[in-house]
Image: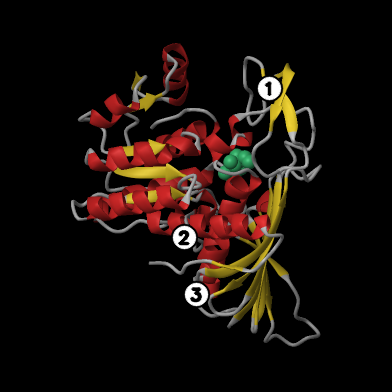
Amino acid sequence: MVGYAFMGAAHSQGWRTAGHVFDLPMRPVLAAVCGRDRSAVEAAAAKHGWAAAETDWRRLIERDDVQVVDVCTPGDSHAEIAIAALEAGKHVLCEKPLANSVAEAEAMVRAAEAARTRGQLAMVGFNYRRVPAVSYARKLIEAGRLGALRHVRVTYLQDWLADPEAPLTWRLDRERAGSGALGDLGAHIVDLAQFLAGEPIAGVSALSETFVRERPVLSGARAGLSGAAGSAYGPVTVDDAAVFTGRLASGALASFEATRMAAGRKNALRLEINGERGSLAFDLERLNELSFHDHSEPAATAGFRRILVTEPEHPYLEAWWPPGHGLGYEHTFVHQARDLVLAVAAGADPAPSFADGLQVQRVLAAVEESAAKNAVYTPVPPPD
Ligand code: SOE
């Protein structure tokens, strides 16, 4: 694994746990973790259970005891590391968003396609697909329980930048992060919309805003998403929020909101999908639940009902706890590790693929293009 901060810690949990919960044909071994600072990466290796620490990712990807390289760095190094790892003969898992630009994502897809001919796999880490309730929602839609889709409504609201004095971390630097709330949170909801609907977004109209244009530079230690503020100020070069509408290929209408400025909302990813035969709703802050309305039921008794998605029949749950003993955020990373291990063992294509990651990137680019022109409708190139 390259990188060991928030996402690195989450992925480590996934790799550590997957083989102990699920019966897998291969069990992940945490061979080596990489970061630039020797003492910090050694501390991270000890804390998260990695057998060795490296300070140069080039050395990591050369190691004979490494079969999968997991890229958990900021977006500006995804393409370089992922492509080099694929060329070195490794399978690759790369955190979302796949890249900082469409051109980088296209290069990554090309590298993944070449590697596929040698039997290697590449997957992008859209972990929320692996919330059991989300995965189950996809199954209900696939089975036609909603009929033709009319509306896909998704919002992802956080508030860790609501304070104008929150410091300038790498996520506020366009060079490193690619974009702001759009790439960080918008990437998740675009992926979920396309995954759940089973079709690409064909075009968008967008607005975006940077409400706080200067923030204190970081001083010293970082903690979680934030860190300690210094006395000097520097420019914020990404969006704080993006709001957009879109059309799916089938003609269904979609709406999206991504912000890190929604005071009081911590990790509120909410979605509702309406079809001709019914509706589904989900809230990440209540992730063991799915709301379902079957529109064919008599009006007098119909209505949204809460499905507690903790039954062994639900995705992933056969291996976990008895019904009602819910899961949380970290389990999505366990499921991600499990799914990649199963794909490697079977030699099967994993999902979401780098091509799926590229398609999300194309939507994000169209959102930026549209927002620069104040919501002019901007088509998204269809999947290759
Ligand atoms: C920060 O906004 C963040 O950690 C995102 O980067 C993750 O992708 C999301 O899952 C939770 O919030």
* Residue at image location 48% in from the left, 48% down from the top: 101
Q: Quadrant of residue 282?
A: bottom right
- Seen in the picture, residue 289 relative to 219 is either above or below; the reply is below
- Element under disc 2: helix
Q: Quadrant of residue 154?
A: bottom right
- Residue for badge 3: 142
In this rendered view, identify the residue nearer to me: 66 or 110.
110
- Element under disc 3: helix
Q: Residues within 10 Å of mark 2 (few under 14, many from 20)?
A: many
Q: Give the residue type at disc 1.
A: Val
From the top left corner, tell me how far across and down residue 267 is, in percent: 69, 45
Mark number displayed over residue 359: 2
* Residue at image location 58% in from the left, 69% down from the top: 203
Q: Give the residue type at disc 2.
A: Gln
- Residue for badge 1: 217
Query: Can the viewer see residue 325 in this picture?
Result: no
